[in-house]
Amino acid sequence: MRGRGRFLEWTLQDTQQTGLRYVGKCGICSAFCIDTDSDDEARKWCLEHVGATGHVFFEVTASLYLDAVLADHPAGDGTPPT
Ligand SMILES: [Zn+2]
């Protein structure tokens, strides 16, 4: 995906190459697990939290971390020109 802003062409890249990351969060006490690359692990944390607390409302979110870099930048490092 590309976009233009201030006459520069930007592109989004998954430069950390982490892929989707999942987090399970309790809707009662807001406790959450460490992010993981597996939705099963996030769900497992939710089930463990039920057993420990009795809390029964959860949210599992997926996030993709992206960096915006300049497309076709002469320096080739993706940083904005100064
Ligand atoms: Zn809770």
Image: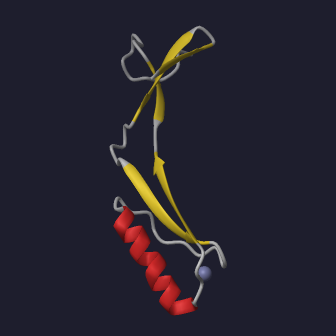
Image position of 11 with respect to 37: above or below: above
The residue depicted at 48 percent of the width and 90 percent of the height is 51
The residue depicted at 52 percent of the width and 20 percent of the height is 80
Image position of 16 (left or right of 34): left
Image position of 12 with respect to 72: above or below: below
The image quadrant where one finds ligand 1 is: bottom right
Residue sitting at the far right: 28
Image position of 76 (left or right of 80): left
Image position of 55 with respect to 74: above or below: below
Residue sitting at the far front: 56
Residue 64 at x, y percent in the picture: 45, 45
Res 32 quadrant in image: bottom right
Image position of 61 (left or right of 57): left
Check the picture and name the quadrant holding the N terminus: top left
Q: Nearer the viewer, residue 58 or 29?
A: 58
Image position of 6 (left or right of 11): right
Q: How is the image coloured?
A: secondary structure
Check the picture and name the quadrant holding the C terminus: top right
The residue depicted at 44 percent of the width and 77 percent of the height is 45
Q: Nearer the viewer, residue 14 or 45?
A: 45
The residue depicted at 39 percent of the width and 12 percent of the height is 72
Residue 53 at x, y percent in the picture: 57, 90
Residue 75 at x, y percent in the picture: 39, 15
Residue 67 at x, y percent in the picture: 47, 35
Image position of 48 with respect to 60: above or below: below
| Count of all numbered marks drawn on residues in the image | 0
